[in-house]
Image (spheres, rainbow, N blue to C red):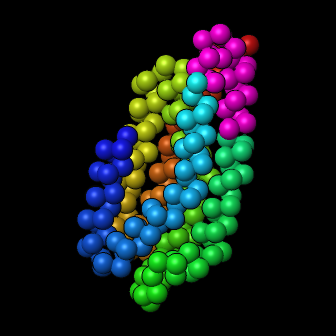
Amino acid sequence: MQLLMTLYIVVLNIILAGFCDEAVTVLGLYYKLQTFFFIPLSALQTCIVPVLSYNYARKNNDRCVKIVSTSIGSSVAFMLIGVFCFEFLPELLITLFSSDKNVLDIGIHAFRIIGLSFVPAVFSLIYPVFFQAIGAAKPSVLLAITRQIFCLIPIFAVLSLLGLNYVWFAFPLSEIITGGIGFLLYAKWKRNAVT
C-alpha cells in the first residue's frame, strides 16, 4: 500500500508539473496537512482489525456490524473538522508553509475542493480494513487499488485535460467511487452474514 501511495503521488506530481511548480507545491502541502486528519483514522483502522477478527471468528457478525458502524460514525465526526478547516481556513493552513501568491491562489481553490473528499474517504478506508479483518483479501485489495490506482490517477489525468482548476475534483470523485463500491460489497456481506 505504501508503494501504491508513492506511485500515485509521483504520477500526480508529473501531471501537475505540466502546469506549474506552484501546483506541485500545493499537492505537497495538501499531503502534509491532511496527515493531521488521516493519522487518527489510520490509528482507528489499526485498532479495529483485531476486534473485528476476534468477533468474526466467534461468528458474532452483529457485533462486527456494530464495530463498523461505530467506527464510521466517529471517523465522520472527526473528519468533519478536516472539512471545516479545508473549506473555511485554507488560506491560514497554506500560509503556515508558504506566502507565495500563486501557491495561495491555487491552494485555496484546491483545498476547498479536496476538503470535500474527507467524509467519503472514511468509507473508502474503513471498508477495506473490514474485509482485511475478516480474511477477505480480494475485496480489501480491490478497494485499496481502486482508490489509489484505478480511480485517482485516471480521473486526475482526464481532468487535467480540462485545466488545473479541475484536477482537484479527482480526490472527492475517487473517494466517492471507492466508498460506493466498498458499501456495496459490505452490504452484500451483511445481507448474507447477519440474521
Main secondary structure along the magenta-highlighted residues: helix
Magenta-span inclusion, residue 61:
yes
The location of residue 183, given as percent across then percent down, is 59, 35
Question: Foreground residue, 56 or 179?
Answer: 56
Q: Give the vertical position of 2 relative to 170 (above or below).
A: above
Magenta-span inclusion, residue 83:
no
**Which stretch is magenta?**
51-71
The location of residue 165, given as percent across then percent down, is 44, 74
The location of residue 74, given as percent across then percent down, is 72, 45
Residue in the picture at 57% in, 28% down: 49
Quadrant (top left/top right/bottom left/bottom right) for the C terminus: top right
Residue in the picture at 59% in, 46% down: 41
Residue in the picture at 50% in, 43% down: 178
Count of labels in the image: 0
The location of residue 21, given as percent across then percent down, is 30, 78
Q: Give the vertical position of 115 relative to 98 (above or below).
A: above
Q: Is residue 130 left or right of residue 137?
A: right
Question: Foreground residue, 17 or 48?
Answer: 48
Question: Foreground residue, 151 or 101?
Answer: 101
Q: Is residue 145 left or right of residue 99?
A: left
Quadrant (top left/top right/bottom left/bottom right) for the N terminus: top left
